[in-house]
Image (cartoon, grey):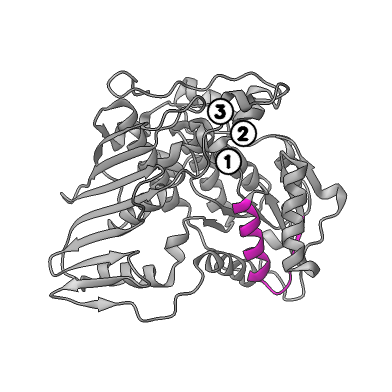
Amino acid sequence: MSKAMDNASPTLSRRHFLRTGSVSLLAPAIITAATTLRAQKKADSNETLRIGLIGCGGRGTGAAAQALQADYNARLVAVADVSETQIDTSIASLSAKTPDRVTVSPEHRFTGLDAYQKLLASDVDVVLLATPPGYRPLHLTAAVEAGKHTFCEKPMAVDAVGYHVAMAALAKAKEKKLNVTAGFCWRYSTSRRESFKRLKDGEFGDLMSYFGTYYGSPVKPIAAVSARKPDQSDVQWQIAGWNNFSWLSGDSYVEQAVHSVDKLLWAMNDQPPVSCIASGGRQAPAEGGNIFDHFHVAYEFANGLTGHIGSRQMTGCSNENLDYIQCSQAKLVIGKGSAPFAEGAKRWRFRGEEKNMYQIEHDELFAAVRSGKTVFDGDWMMRSTLAAIMGREAAYTGQRLTWEQILASKQDLASEESLKWDDKFEPTPRPIPGVTKFV
């Protein structure tokens, strides 16, 4: 990671970065709420930690449920989403589980693409970012500017320009000593933490190769264009089916298989790959959307090792989500069966208690806020995000790409801060390897 990337601070817009290559970027100026005392120092035991949820879909609702369980004196006090119906569903679900901890007044139910700004201007201490990933850099920047502790769902960007926006925000978060926890849930898994510790301690010998799979069914089928409602704008239609558009999801590789990319970099001591080469495409026909349904990416690292990630979202195929980590004295297998295990000259199986990794994410975040300590996942979560973007672009273009190339890329799939709810917007066409050019 270059020093310039790590030390960037927000001063300019996403579009300005695209024109000039600057890594200094600006959070929305309308965020004027003062940083709360609880976001600056240890929270007293009798202080209520006020939670704001941005993105009330399934993942956001799940994150809110875990946040409410993480601290004995936490309350959900504000929510934001483009859909009032989604807000109703989320609040109903959360209220059924913890009725005494969901205290969202009507004036703190914010809707629209600017709802995040209104929520951040309210008196919340911790925000949960769980909208479609294309909006993540914008929302992360605004949350940091507003001085909020943040749970940031993965991925943190969908293109290189968004990566630099988020990096600039995180540099400011470091300065403010804000807590930032990543939605890379496997980093919080009890068994995975022990597995990777043993791996790095050399218990299984020298690391030789890594193969991770993320083979599953489509998260959300691509809706036929004929099903689009006559009054839906391009932006409305695409947000409704956000998984199927790269400017919103990053494609399936960046949105979902990024978990496997993150574990690969974890095994490589969070060092970025030197280069990668990839294949990918779309096997299942589809009218709408511009994403691939399968990828295979081979990453090369400075230590001479190669790590492979295979992913697909297809029906009727064998599914698995495994990590095969070959070492000189054993093969460590994660995800097959109830616990990680190593087979070979060095044998091992995880025998401890497997706690809920989604809950641990929030337990550690809220414990830090309550105690005055700081947890900060910013650097490695961004490195994993960019490595996934790099792999996707290698597949899209059919070209071998280097880390330096993806850092210098000016790809901007969409400038989210300029898009309005009723706008027309034509996303990039589905890529054709060998034809699509690297930006």
Q: Which numbered tag is attached to residue 132?
A: 1
Q: Which numbered dot is residue 224?
A: 3
Q: Are marks 3 and 2 in contact (CB under 8 Å)?
A: no
Q: In the rendered view, does 324 fall on the left or right side of 19?
A: left
Secondary element at image label 2: helix
- The residue range painted magenta reads 58-77
Which is in the foreground here, disc 2 or disc 1?
2
Whole-number angstrom distance, CA of label 3 to CA of label 2: 15 Å
Residue contact between numbered discs 2 and 1, judged by CB atoms under 8 Å? yes
Between 171 and 207, the one lying in front of the other is 207
- Could you tell me how far apart the alpha carbons at marks 1 and 3 are, in whole angstroms? 20 Å
Q: Nearer the viewer, residue 400 or 233?
A: 233
Which mark is first along the chain, 3 or 1?
1
At x 25%, y 77%, the residue is 348
Secondary element type, mark 1: loop
Q: Which residue is mark 2?
A: 239
In the image, is residue 49 above or below residue 11? below
Q: Residue at x 27, y 27 (%)?
A: 398
Q: Amino acid at mark 1?
A: Pro
Question: Which amino acid lies under the numbered mark 3 shown in the image of this protein?
Answer: Ala
Q: x, y percentage for residue 325?
A: 23, 61
Q: Residue 182 location, x and y as percent?
A: 51, 55
Q: Earlier in the sequence, mark 2 or mark 1?
A: 1
Circle 3 sits in a helix, a strand or a loop, which is it? loop
**How many other residues sit within 10 Å of disc 1, few (<14), some (14-19) or many (≥20)?**
many
